[in-house]
Image (cartoon, rainbow, N blue to C red):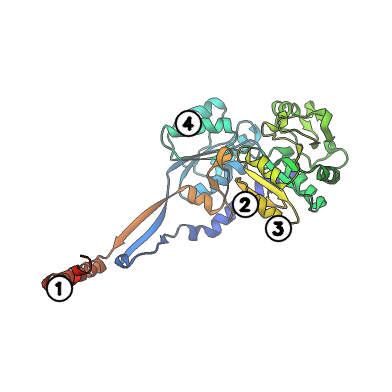
Amino acid sequence: PYQEALMMEVAFVRNEIVTALEELSQWVKPERVKKPLVNQFDDCMIRSEPLGTVLVMGAWNYPFQLLLSPVVGAIAAGNCVILKPSEVSMNTAALVANLIPKYLDNECYPVIYGGLDISKATLEQRFDHIFYTGGSAVGKIVMEAASKHLTPVILELGGKSPCIVDDNCNFEIAAQRIAWGKYINSGQTCIAPDYVLCSKATQQKLVQELKRSIEKFYGENSKDSTDFCRMVNVRHLKRVAGLIDKNNVAIGGDVDESSRFISPTVVTDVKPDDAIMQEEIFGPVLPIVTIDNVEDAIEFVNSREKPLALYVFSNQRSYLDNVIENTTSGGCVANDTLMHTSLPTLPFGGVGYSGMGAYHGKFTFDVYSHKRSVMGGSNLLKIIVVGAFIGFMYKVLMNSSSLSSYFSKWF
């Protein structure tokens, strides 16, 4: 859809570029550090220097944003960058491979275009940094390849991002923001709400509001909507469709393989051991797991791998604080979804199984910069201090009474 592509792909990368252009003169300035008295005449600083040649491996779900956003910071930091777009989103990959050489030096910023064999051959080379966005299975392969050369990495891996909904919240607003975050790009977003945790009573209210929100966004028949995306290919469609339990479908559940369409779907009364709760869904299917209270929700989240994002909806500040303070995730948003990624002054990244490292804005610049400690300057103050100390000790030693008095304090 046009609006999704404009907002999530083009505008996002443009915002990163604008931020870098406006702030780069400040980012590159040497950072002066605090100094003790003996170093007051020394020039002590931290310099940001390029790492060298870096590899950025993009993902297929947002093939433009997730490839070029880290590249902006890498170039700003002075690195050469090898770009590897995902072959799954073949049209965008071909476009990037065609356009980048027209506007950037192909020797400094080459585009590698190809499938699995090309990726494997690329990872055998030595880089000064590797950036990868995708699944944990390939993330392990990337990390193993990087370890052979002790190459640092950023891994953005995703996972099952929970959405906790309190009984005391604005259900209309909550449903609209959950539906938007879940069904944009047909659920193929690494930080999309993967499942909802709420009470039985809240589940009923939330389902009603979700139905209204879905119809408001995509009409009564989402298949005819020009604003609703499709699955990237048939293989991924079949995987997601296989997770839908028809007996528990409260909204949607329609699948059309020929057009790669899965309708916005809500599945209720889901059990923790159901198949849909064992892997990241990465599609337009939202399961709801019922819990009794916020303590159960927190325990549920903490019993699983650390998610890339966590969302919580409540009108109570104490409820929000309780969830935020007692859980861990890459990022956390109260009473909204996805929006933390739009702010370049907030780092975006995972923790634990959802990834390592963070970027966006200056954080990307810092990722691709070596922070070099530099000390230099005059030894004048050191000479003065050392000379004064020697003079003091000479006087002490020459004055036996003073020396005896000095040592009598301790013996």
> Mark 2 sits on what residue?
325
Q: CA distance from mark 4 to mark 1?
A: 64 Å
Question: Where residue 212 appears, x then y in whole percent?
Answer: 86, 45
Label 3 residue SS: helix
Rendered residue at 71%/44% (across/down): 163
Identify the amino acid type marked 4.
Glu
- Quadrant of the rendered structure where residue 380 is? bottom left
Identify the amino acid type marked 3.
Arg
Question: Where residue 246 appears, x then y in whole percent?
Answer: 82, 28
In the rendered structure, find residue 144 and report the number of the disc placed on it: 4
The mark lying in front, picked from 2 and 4, is: 2
Identify the amino acid type marked 1.
Lys
Label 1 residue SS: helix
Q: Residue furthest front?
A: 411
Rendered residue at 33%/63% (across/down): 43
Task: Give the class, few, some or many, for how many residues have Cα within 10 Å of label 3's Cα (few <14, many ≥20).
Answer: few
Work out whether residue 227 can be spotted.
Answer: yes
The mark lying in front, picked from 4 and 1, is: 1
Q: CA distance from mark 3 to mark 4?
A: 43 Å
> Mark 1 sits on what residue?
395
Left or right, residue 66 beside residue 389: right
Q: Where 200 falls versus 366 (above or below)?
A: above
